[in-house]
Image (cartoon, rainbow, N blue to C red):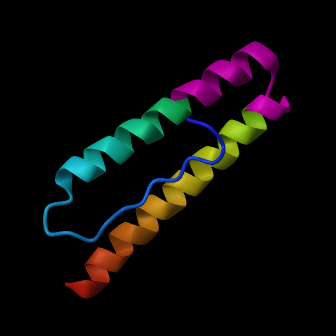
Amino acid sequence: MNKHTKVILLGTSSTAPLEAIVSSQIEYLRGRMVFLGTRYGLRHPAVQQCSEQLDELLLEFYNSKQKLVNRA
């Protein structure tokens, strides 16, 4: 995943497969951030970039889930 990668969550009736994909992307980024932080230290630019990517993905994920809840 690069810093320009975006995940678009669609509000469909069957979001379980999409949620699984996004959840695995979130876990991947978490693991990568831990690896990079352990290897280079938490202030390294690569760690900061990974953290920002994770933040963006989490916000998109939670916002899309909230939109689905509000529609119901």
On screen, residue 24 above or below 36: below
Foreground residue among 8 and 20: 8
Residue that sits furthest to the top in the current view:
39
Residue at the spot x=80%, y=18% of the render?
40
**Is 30 inside the magenta-drawn segment?**
no
Left or right: 4 with respect to 59? right
Foreground residue among 10 and 58: 10
Residue 56 lies, in percent from the top left, at 59, 56
Q: Main secondary structure of the magenta part?
A: helix
Residue 9 lies, in percent from the top left, at 36, 62
Left or right: 21 with respect to 38? left
Residue 57 lies, in percent from the top left, at 52, 53
The stretch in magenta equals 31-46
On screen, residue 62 above or below 29: below
How many labels were placed on the picture?
0
Quadrant the C terminus occupies: bottom left
Residue at the spot x=73%, y=40% of the render?
49
Residue at the spot x=30%, y=85% of the render?
70
On screen, residue 32 above or below 11: above
Residue 64 lies, in percent from the top left, at 39, 69
